[in-house]
């Protein structure tokens, strides 16, 4: 069994240092062992404010990244967090993963950019998918909108991932993504999904919260509501095998006639 935590952050006007301190305090309250903590999309800068995004953008080995690395070592767990990445003259909507020794395992750049909050105008799209291994789990890392493409998640499932982790910045204008699509992606692929959203109101956006960890049956292992909290759920790999024997979508889809 592996335990995954999601830090559902209440988005507010704060510096990255303030946000890291809030994460630190939230992890300190955990009583059980946790292998991975996931923070929302653009956790470092906040979502929806181009000025803040540019102000707090940094390279993947920047000072905020170093603070997260130190936090991962301090608590002996992996941390995945969203941030605006500056590489040369380009900005990327990225999510980086540090393992429990403080080493960067992946730096995923969002490959599909929506028009929401002008993401497609602020950022450059990434070009690669990201699959990593943590504590015996094979994990695909995606960011928000990417989860809404069944092709991306099906491809990850064909690559034998156990868990899809999706930092997100979902507003209450599009509740289907949190309430239905994330659960469908888990169910139709026989995998776990960790959906890490913000909550609260910031930059004119009402973030809906409702972060969750979903099992291969498409049911919530644990879910948050609309307040800042750190939720924890267990990943039972045996459930993947059980569900896929009963509902072999990944095998049966190969026999479907394409139009």
Image: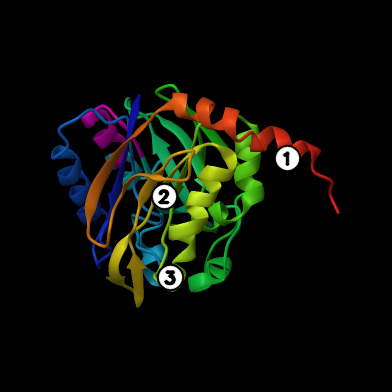
> Where does the image place residue 163, in percent across and percent down from the top left?
48, 36
Query: Which residue is pictured at 51% across the width and 37% down the height?
Result: 191
Q: Is residue 239 above or below residue 202?
A: above
Query: Which residue is pictured at 32% across the width and 25% down the height?
Result: 101
- Asked if labels 2 and 3 touch by Cβ distance under 8 angstroms, the answer is no
Q: Which residue is mark 3?
A: 50
Q: Main secondary structure of the magenta part?
A: helix
Q: Nearer the viewer, mark 3 or mark 1?
A: 1
> Where does the image place residue 186, in percent across and percent down from the top left?
51, 44
From this viewpoint, which residue is outermost toward the top? Answer: 136
Q: Residues within 10 Å of mark 2 (few under 14, many from 20)?
A: many
The answer to which quarter of the image holds residue 46 is: bottom left
Q: Which residue is mark 2?
A: 195
- Asked if labels 1 and 3 touch by Cβ distance under 8 angstroms, the answer is no
Decide if residue 143 is in sight here.
no
In the rendered structure, the answer to whether residue 250 lies left or right of residue 217 reads right
The answer to which quarter of the image holds residue 165 is: top left
Q: Which residue is mark 1?
A: 253
Looking at the rendered structure, the secondary structure element under dot 2 is strand
Between the residue at mark 1 and the residue at mark 2, the CA separation in whole angstroms equals 25 Å
Between the residue at mark 3 and the residue at mark 1, the CA separation in whole angstroms equals 41 Å
> Where does the image place residue 89, in percent across and percent down from the top left?
54, 58
Q: Residues within 10 Å of mark 3 (few under 14, many from 20)?
A: some
Q: Nearer the viewer, mark 1 or mark 2?
A: 1
Sequence-first tag of 1 and 2? 2
Between the residue at mark 3 and the residue at mark 2, the CA separation in whole angstroms equals 24 Å
Q: Residues within 10 Å of mark 1 (few under 14, many from 20)?
A: few
């Amino acid at each position: 069994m592996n335990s995954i935590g999601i830090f559902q952050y209440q988005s507010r006007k704060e510096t990255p240092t303030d946000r890291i301190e809030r994460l630190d305090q939230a992890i300190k309250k955990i009583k059980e062992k946790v292998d991975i903590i996931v923070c929302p999309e653009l956790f470092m800068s906040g979502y929806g404010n181009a000025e803040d995004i540019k102000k707090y953008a940094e390279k993947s080995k920047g000072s905020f990244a170093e603070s997260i690395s130190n936090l991962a070592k301090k608590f002996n767990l992996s941390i995945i967090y969203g941030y605006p990445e500056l590489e040369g003259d380009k900005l990327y909507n990225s999510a980086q993963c540090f393992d429990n020794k403080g080493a960067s395992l992946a730096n995923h750049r969002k490959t599909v950019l929506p028009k929401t909050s002008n993401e497609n105008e602020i950022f450059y799209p990434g070009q690669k998918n990201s699959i990593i291994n943590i504590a015996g789990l094979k994990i695909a890392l995606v960011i928000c909108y990417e989860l809404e493409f069944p092709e991306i998640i099906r491809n990850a499932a064909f690559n034998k991932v156990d868990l899809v982790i999706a930092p997100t910045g979902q507003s209450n204008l599009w509740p289907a993504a949190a309430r239905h699509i994330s659960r469908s992606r888990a169910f139709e692929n026989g995998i776990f999904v960790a959906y890490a959203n913000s909550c609260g109101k910031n930059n004119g956006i009402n973030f809906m919260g409702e972060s969750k960890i979903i099992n291969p049956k498409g049911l919530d292992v644990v879910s948050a509501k609309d307040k800042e909290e750190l939720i924890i759920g267990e990943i039972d790999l045996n459930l993947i095998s059980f569900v896929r024997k009963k509902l072999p979508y990944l095998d049966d889809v190969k026999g479907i006639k394409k139009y």
